[in-house]
Structure formats: structure tokens, C-alpha cells
Image: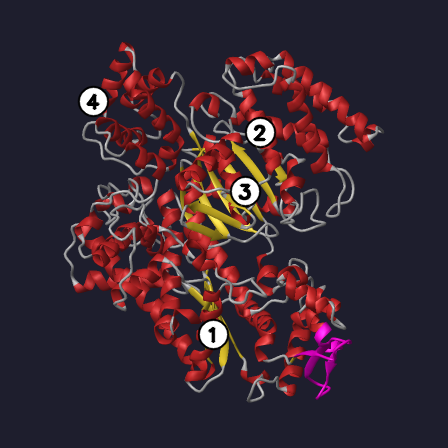
């Protein structure tokens, strides 16, 4: 079986979940029965999430906030896994989670072959935030309350250990004696600042009320369940329909040979020719989806109640969050009212004595307990990893834990330096030597993973590339020093252009995940497509069988586990592979369907496109010409595997010869927001814009992306569009996913992202002037926004816009000979200006015309204007492939 072993179906007649998920669920239920209990569904949430994570000044703060929450989420799950086994956790899947593997190996004595175990850098998967802030488990009902107490105690103990270690390190680094008075004084402040963090909310829903002692459903409990769900639906406007309204359950109710009018009894369909009957009696497990949605309702009710404990904070607040007073020693109480500019003339605070300690922050920064915890977390966790590995010293050598925004902005330039150093002329060699001398004694920084791997063993080049960003990050009153200006001049000489100053952030979130988990009929396929064809054909011939086959597949615990497994695979294996191996990027967190990553600007578009394709496991063939470099990367992977077939197709991703990974499938979609910002822009502001971009994508009907460009000099550009592929029938202008026909259907269409690719790369070609965009914008401003406004037929309107754009593109050098001089093949009888203009206008019309999700036309000219402006910015010198030599989307 080889690499197919993990995908072996539990039942070949219904191959929609693996044997491993089936066995895990069986084990979870058997655990409750073995203790003389029936199962109860436990749903737990840790928070707050966004408000805690986004209070960040640096990428290190951002990573620390998300990773710390993921760490505490494991300590919430850990007592349940220890008491009943990890199989009882239905969501998230714990299979292959690094923190869980450490627990199994170090604490449970189970030897595991972990290829990453000896890794001494933050490329170690332990440094990835891979667990979400919620979990669902099946626990013995009678032990439910005890389990909750253990969960709360475990999280509190883990947090207390971190606080104690932080207070001790704070005093040590400040040169203070470790007296009990000062230790307790700081610890009390920190605990006050952490009061209510993390906030644990939970719901515990037992199976016992609907269990009738055996395998049948209790009538009274079933009626009570219906009443409860009905009441929640009455007070929750817009809430999806209940499982009890699911077509599958309705078919069961309609065809039941009822033994009790209050409760489902035995259901049967029969062969009218032979008299043979297929009988089925719903059991309590059949109602798992109803109990799960009831648990969701109770959890939402619990989260709506906020505990509020007022606190008194005097004097100036924390320099990072601005909410709480900064930490101080007993003798420093009077300094809290001293303005920042006068603190040095007053008695020196503990924070001023920590200025030369890089883990605590910037010069003059004063932090509260909660923000100090984020600064301390990278050092604490690296030492924790070292202890797990058998020694602390290795952990203490990891000075940087997250790639800085400046390093990411320079990533492609640093790669270009590595590529050119052996081909330098005499003047460039002098510039190289000057940079080498300037970086002597400078501490190295963390690099994007793919670049770090590329540099391994390259001696002087590796040392220079690792030190150069640290030198350029030094600040003198937020302005470059003379030494930095000289280094920038030398880099310009080596690169032939100014170094890049912008980086990009990507925020992705799966669409309608609640509906997928609950098995909502709107997203599920009918049973006739879910079952093996022989079984479906047989049932279709039975009396009443067709009604059953046309029902959408209902939700179930096994379906929930299969989703958990797919999201686990994406978070732990697929997303890191795309962001950190295929591109110059860094994954900050990925909890399943939500992801935050940082990438270089010229890798932004291909990375977004690949993440979207890899999430669903589909690749639209109509975009092949525009994004051919991505196909080249996938082809190289395929050649390395020595196997036939696509790398991404039919809901699967093949990373290697022995790795076939199941992901969400083509019917599942994701929306994405992205922001391009200057590396000196305040991170908090960039994150707000990133959230706004993601919201804009969701507001565009989901299965969309939105890109925002924040210019350093002020002003912003944006472009929002649908992905154009994936999802279900009737999902707007996108090509819906049908496993049999998607390849041929998508070959006839172009997605907005591929059009953006093609336009960006065309504008980046030497000999093509970006003035074409500015001229086109002036003309578009005077055009009718859509065919209705211009009282034109759509075909006439399309020809008018295509002629306008093609004329401007051709005037500014977008000709076949220009492409051929740049080494890009173009058919002699094909005009690139005309073809690109046709693609842009066709995409804009498809995005703006009325469809099932929207009435009325949107502005086509505005859509084109936004696309042109974003493409022009991304095509500027040094950003697109034509200038950098590597990356996505030539």
C-alpha cells in the first residue's frame, strides 16, 4: 500500500473517511463505555485571540502571541489525552502535531522517528503555531466536570510556570538580586495583568438523554432535543437549519415503520421483485450532528457572557498595548507618572536597565506583564525545546526566532547577491568587499527557509547575507546612518537598482467552515456521489431508494474527523511547504483553515495562488500560460518523484514520491486578504489593514481575494476579485468544482489572479513602459462604468474596452518583438497587447456582471483601474520575475 496506507477507506462502499479515523472514533466511544459511562460532547474555546495576537510591534511579537495561544491550547487538551487517550479529541486532529509527538516520546516513552527532532533552529516544526484555540472531544459523561477542572488547572499551571520563569529572567537581566520581595512584587503585577487570560469557555452536551439503554433512541430525550434546538433557532436569526431539518433525516422520518410516534423507529426500503428489504434503525450516534450544533449554541451563549473585573492602572501605560501600567519594582512606583522623555533623569527604571538585552524590546520601551510575556516567550520556548532535546545550550544559541519585516523585504535582493557574487566586475567586487568589511562583528539574522537552505555551506556569502539585514536595521532616530547610506549605495551598485523596501502579509480563512463541520446540505454532495457506484446503483433499484440517494450526505462524527484530518494536513504539511519551500516566505501561524504568512513582494501573487489551490487540492488548467512558472515548479516536483499525474488535483496534494496528502477538496473554498507595506510601517496599522482586506474578500461573496498596497508616502491601492474557480454550482461567476469535468471546464476560463500575473509580468519586461497604465486610467475615467450605463450591448462594450487598452499597451512597447528580446516566447502571429487586453476585459466583465450572488452590474472600469494600478506597483523595478530571475509567474 505504501503512501496510500494513510488513506485506506474505512468502508469501500462509503469511501469518505479513512480506517484510521474510523478506528479513532471507535476508540473514543469505547473509552466511555469501558468506564461504565456514555459519551458526552465537550466543546472548549480559549480566548481572546485577535486582540491578544494583534497587540504587536514586531513580527516576533505577532508570532509569540499566536504560538503562546497554541501552546496553551495543547495544555488544555493534554489532561484529556492523558486520561482517555488522544483519540477522544475529534477536532483538531492530533496526528503528527509536534507538541503531541514530544509528549508521546518524552512523557509516554513511545519511540517515534521524528526527522525534525534534532533541528536546532526555529525551522523546527515545534516553532509553528499549529493548534487552533478550540477543540471538541468525546469524554465519559460522569467525568465531564472533573475533566473541565483538570483542563483549567493544566492551563493555569502552564501559564504560572512561564510567569515565574519570566519574572526570574527579568530580574537577572536587569542585574537585580533574586529576593523574595521583588520576585513576588513583580509576579503579583504580572498575574493582575493576566487576569482572565486565557478565557476558557466550554459546553458539555451528554448523549445519555437520547440513549435508551441500548442502541435505540430515547423518545423523551429526542423530543427534548428537538425542543431545545427549535428554541435556539427562534432566537438566532440567519442561523442555518438544524440537522433535524436535514433532507436525509426527513427521508428517514417519512419512511419509518414507527414504533413510537415521538421518536424514529426502524426504516426500510425494499426490492419489489424479490421482497428483500434493507432495514436501518437510527441509533444515538446518528444524532451526533444535532448534539454538536447544540454544543455550538451553548458555547456561543457562554462566550456572550463576559466576565469584567475592573482594575486600577495609574500613571503612564505600557508602550506596546497602551492598556495596562508597565511593570516596576517597589522602589520605582514614583516613576510611573514620569513622562517617557524624562525617565532617564529620574531614578533608572528596570526597563532602562534592560535596554542592552535584545529579548526585552527596543530602547526606552516599558511593557506591562502581558506584553512582556510575548517578548519573553521566544527565549523561554527555545530553552524548553532544548530541554526536550536533552540540553539547554542549543536553545540559548537561537538568537532570532522570526524573520523581520526588513529581512523579508530584502529577501529577493539577498538571493540576487548570492547568485551574482561569483560574476562581479572589478567595480562591483570593490562594493562587495566594502559590504563584507562593514558587516564584520554584526550578529546574523534569521532568513526565509528556502534562502537559508540555498546558502548553506557557502562561507563568506552566507555570513554576509545573514549579517546585512541586521546592519541595515540599526536606527539612529529612525533615519539611516551614514554607514547605512553607504551600504545602500554599494547594494545599488551590485544589484543595478535600489534595494526593496516593501514586504507582504497574507491572511487566509476557509469559507463556510461551520457549514462543512455541521454537514449543511448546501455544501455536501448527494449520497449517490458519496457511495461506491455499485452500491448506489443497487439502492437506486429499490423502492424508495432514489429519494435516499438524492439526499445530501449528512454530517457525522466520522465526517467531522475526516475534516479535522484534512485541515491538520494543510496546517502541518501543505502550508509550510508552499510558503517556506516553494517561495521566499515565513509561516507565522496556521491553525487549519486560517493562516497568516509573510512573503517577499514578488512572491505575493504566486504564493496566494498556490495556497488557494493547495487548500482545495485543485489547479485550474486555463491559467497554465499565465502562471507557467508555477507549473514548472510542480513539474520539477513531479520529475523528482518519478511519478505520473498532477501534483495538485482532485482534492489531493503530492509533496513527494511517498506522500499523497488529502486536503479539503474542490467544493471547499477559502478567502484571502493581503497587504503590501513598507518595512517601517507600524505593524499594528498593517494588521488592521490586513483584517480589512480579508473582510473585503469575504464581503465579495467569499472564494475571493483582496490585495491592499500601503504606500510609504501615503495613499493606498486595492484590488478585490473572486478566485474564479472551485466551490459548488450557483456560487457566482466561478467555475464550480466537478471532479469529472473541472479540468476541461477550467481550461476554457481565465481567473482574475492569472490575469493579474500576466499583466504584472508584461509591464515588468524591459522595453514596456508602465506609462501605459497611467494613460489607460485617464481614458477609463471617462468611460461608462458598465454596459447598462452606456446603453450598449455587452459585446460592444467589451470590444470598446479591449480596443482602448490594446492601443495604450501597444503604444508603450507591448509588442511581440519586445517579448522575444526578453526571452519570452510569443507566437509570431499573435499580438500580446490585444490578447492581454482581451483577458483583462473578459475577467472584469465576468467579475462585475449580475449573477446568483448579486443583482445589477458593478463598475467594470473601476475594476480594471484597480487591477491596472496594483499590477503596475508590483511590476516596478526589482519586483517581477523579469528583473529578479526567480519566483512565480513569468
Q: Is residue 123 magenta?
A: no
Q: Return the x and y of residue 612 as percentages of the image width and height.
A: 54, 44
Residue occupied by mark 2: 625
Q: Position of residue 657 (x, y in %)?
A: 41, 46
User: Does the rendering let one see residue 174?
Assistant: no
Q: Is the C-beta separation of discs 1 and 2 under 8 Å? A: no
Q: Earlier in the sequence, mark 2 or mark 3?
A: 2
First-in-chain label (1 vs 2): 1
Q: Is residue 579 above or below residue 170?
A: above
Distance from disc 1 to disc 2, alpha carbons, whole Å, reads 48 Å
Q: Is residue 663 above or below residue 142?
A: above
Which residue is found at the position 73% from the left and 77% from the top? 270
Span shown in magenta: 251-279
Mark 4 vs 2, N-terminal side: 4
Q: Is residue 453 visible?
A: yes
Q: Are there few (<14), some (14-19), or many (20+) residues within 10 Å of tag 1?
A: some
Viewer-proximal residue, 771 or 796?
Answer: 796
Q: Is 329 displayed left or right of 664 in the figure?
A: left
Residue designated by label 4: 437
Q: Earlier in the sequence, mark 1 or mark 3?
A: 1
Q: Which residue is mark 1?
A: 26
Instruction: For the N terminus, give its image quadrant.
Output: bottom left
Q: Which residue is mark 3?
A: 673
- Please name which of the two marks, 1 or 4, marks the residue nearer to the observer: 1
As displayed, is residue 521 above or below residue 640?
below
Q: Secondary structure at mark 2?
A: loop
Amino acid at each position: 500500500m505504501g503512501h496510500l496506507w494513510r488513506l485506506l477507506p474505512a468502508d469501500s462502499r462509503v469511501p469518505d473517511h479513512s480506517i484510521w479515523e474510523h478506528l479513532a472514533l471507535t476508540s473514543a466511544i469505547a473509552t466511555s463505555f469501558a468506564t461504565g459511562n456514555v459519551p458526552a460532547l465537550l466543546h472548549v474555546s480559549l480566548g481572546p485571540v485577535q486582540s491578544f495576537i494583534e497587540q504587536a510591534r514586531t513580527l516576533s511579537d505577532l508570532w509569540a502571541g499566536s504560538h503562546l495561544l497554541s501552546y496553551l491550547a495543547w495544555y488544555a487538551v493534554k489532561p484529556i489525552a492523558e486520561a482517555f487517550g488522544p483519540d477522544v479529541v475529534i477536532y483538531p486532529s492530533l496526528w503528527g502535531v509536534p507538541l503531541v509527538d514530544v509528549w508521546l516520546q518524552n512523557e509516554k516513552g513511545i519511540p517515534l522517528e521524528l526527522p525534525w527532532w534534532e533541528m536546532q533552529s526555529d525551522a523546527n516544526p515545534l516553532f509553528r503555531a499549529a493548534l487552533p484555540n478550540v477543540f471538541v472531544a468525546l469524554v465519559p459523561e460522569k467525568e465531564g466536570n472533573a475533566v473541565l477542572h483538570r483542563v483549567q488547572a493544566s492551563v493555569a499551571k502552564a501559564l504560572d510556570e512561564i510567569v515565574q520563569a519570566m519574572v526570574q529572567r527579568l530580574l537577572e537581566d536587569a542585574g537585580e538580586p533574586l529576593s523574595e520581595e521583588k520576585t513576588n512584587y513583580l509576579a503579583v503585577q504580572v498575574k493582575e495583568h493576566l487576569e482572565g487570560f486565557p478565557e476558557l469557555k466550554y459546553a458539555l452536551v451528554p448523549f445519555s438523554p437520547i440513549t435508551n439503554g441500548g442502541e435505540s433512541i430515547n423518545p423523551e430525550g429526542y423530543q427534548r432535543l428537538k425542543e431545545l434546538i427549535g428554541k435556539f433557532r427562534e432566537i438566532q436569526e440567519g442561523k442555518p437549519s438544524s440537522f433535524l431539518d436535514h433532507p436525509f433525516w426527513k427521508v428517514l422520518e417519512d419512511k419509518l415503520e414507527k414504533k413510537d410516534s415521538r421518536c424514529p423507529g426502524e426504516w426500510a426500503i425494499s426490492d419489489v421483485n424479490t421482497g428483500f428489504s434493507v432495514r436501518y434503525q437510527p441509533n444515538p450516534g446518528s444524532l451526533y450532528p444535532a448534539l454538536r450544533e447544540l454544543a455550538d449554541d451553548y458555547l456561543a451563549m457562554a462566550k456572550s457572557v463576559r466576565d469584567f473585573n475592573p482594575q486600577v492602572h495609574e500613571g503612564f501605560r505600557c508602550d506596546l498595548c497602551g492598556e495596562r501600567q508597565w511593570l516596576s519594582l517597589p522602589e520605582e512606583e514614583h516613576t510611573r507618572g514620569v513622562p517617557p522623555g524624562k525617565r532617564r533623569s529620574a531614578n533608572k527604571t528596570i526597563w532602562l536597565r534592560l535596554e542592552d538585552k535584545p529579548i526585552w524590546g527596543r530602547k526606552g520601551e516599558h511593557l506591562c506583564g502581558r506584553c512582556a510575556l510575548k517578548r519573553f516567550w521566544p527565549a523561554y520556548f527555545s530553552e524548553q525545546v532544548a530541554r526536550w532535546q536533552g540540553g539547554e545550550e542549543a536553545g540559548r544559541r537561537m538568537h532570532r526566532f522570526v524573520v523581520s519585516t526588513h529581512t523579508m523585504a530584502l529577501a529577493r535582493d539577498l538571493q540576487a547577491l548570492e547568485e551574482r557574487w561569483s560574476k562581479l566586475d572589478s567595480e562591483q567586487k570593490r562594493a562587495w568587499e566594502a559590504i563584507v568589511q562593514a558587516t564584520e562583528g554584526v550578529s546574523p539574522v534569521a532568513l526565509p527557509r528556502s534562502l537559508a537552505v540555498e546558502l548553506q555551506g557557502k562561507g563568506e556569502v552566507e555570513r554576509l547575507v545573514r549579517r546585512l539585514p541586521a546592519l541595515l536595521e540599526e536606527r539612529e532616530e529612525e533615519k539611516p546612518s551614514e554607514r547605512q547610506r553607504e551600504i545602500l549605495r554599494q547594494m545599488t551598485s551590485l544589484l543595478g537598482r535600489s534595494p526593496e523596501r516593501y514586504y507582504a502579509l497574507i491572511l487566509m480563512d476557509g469559507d463556510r467552515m461551520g457549514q462543512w463541520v455541521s454537514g449543511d446540505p448546501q455544501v455536501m454532495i448527494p449520497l449517490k456521489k458519496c457511495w461506491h457506484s455499485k452500491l448506489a446503483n443497487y439502492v437506486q433499484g429499490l423502492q424508495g431508494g432514489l429519494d435516499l440517494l438524492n439526499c445530501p450526505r449528512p454530517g457525522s462524527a466520522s465526517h467531522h474527523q475526516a475534516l479535522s484530518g484534512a485541515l491538520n494536513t494543510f496546517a502541518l504539511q501543505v502550508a509550510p511547504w508552499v510558503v517556506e519551500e516553494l517561495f521566499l516566505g515565513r509561516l507565522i501561524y496556521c491553525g487549519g483553515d486560517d493562516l497568516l504568512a509573510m512573503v517577499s513582494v514578488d512572491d505575493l501573487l504566486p504564493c496566494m495562488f498556490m495556497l488557494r489551490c493547495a487548500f482545495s487540492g485543485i489547479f485550474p488548467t486555463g491559467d497554465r500560460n499565465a502562471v507557467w512558472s508555477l507549473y514548472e515548479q510542480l513539474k520539477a516536483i513531479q520529475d523528482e518523484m518519478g511519478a505520473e499525474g498532477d501534483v495538485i488535483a482532485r482534492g489531493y496534494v503530492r509533496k513527494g514520491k511517498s506522500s499523497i496528502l488529502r486536503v479539503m477538496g474542490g467544493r471547499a473554498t477559502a478567502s484571502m486578504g493581503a497587504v503590501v507595506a513598507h518595512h517601517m510601517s507600524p505593524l499594528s496599522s498593517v494588521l488592521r489593514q490586513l483584517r480589512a482586506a480579508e473582510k473585503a474578500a469575504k464581503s465579495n461573496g467569499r472564494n475571493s481575494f483582496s490585495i491592499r498596497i500601503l504606500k510609504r508616502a501615503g495613499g493606498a491601492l486595492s484590488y478585490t476579485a473572486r478566485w474564479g474557480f472551485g466551490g459548488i454550482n450557483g456560487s457566482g461567476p466561478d467555475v464550480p468544482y466537478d471532479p469529472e469535468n473541472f479540468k476541461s471546464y477550467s481550461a476554457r476560463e481565465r481567473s482574475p489572479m492569472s490575469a493579474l500575473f500576466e499583466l504584472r509580468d508584461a509591464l515588468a519586461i524591459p522595453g514596456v513602459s508602465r506609462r501605459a497604465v497611467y494613460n489607460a486610467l485617464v481614458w477609463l475615467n471617462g468611460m461608462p462604468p458598465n454596459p447598462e450605463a452606456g446603453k450598449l450591448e455587452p459585446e460592444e462594450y467589451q470590444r470598446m474596452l479591449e480596443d482602448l487598452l490594446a492601443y495604450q499597451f501597444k503604444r508603450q512597447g507591448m509588442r511581440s518583438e519586445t517579448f522575444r528580446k526578453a526571452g519570452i516566447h510569443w507566437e509570431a502571429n499573435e499580438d500580446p497587447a490585444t490578447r492581454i487586453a482581451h483577458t483583462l476585459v473578459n475577467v472584469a466583465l465576468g467579475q462585475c456582471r449580475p449573477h446568483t450572488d448579486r443583482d445589477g452590474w458593478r463598475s467594470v472600469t473601476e475594476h480594471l483601474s484597480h487591477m491596472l494600478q496594483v499590477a503596475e506597483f508590483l511590476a516596478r523595478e526589482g519586483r517581477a520575475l523579469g528583473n529578479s530571475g526567480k519566483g512565480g509567474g513569468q
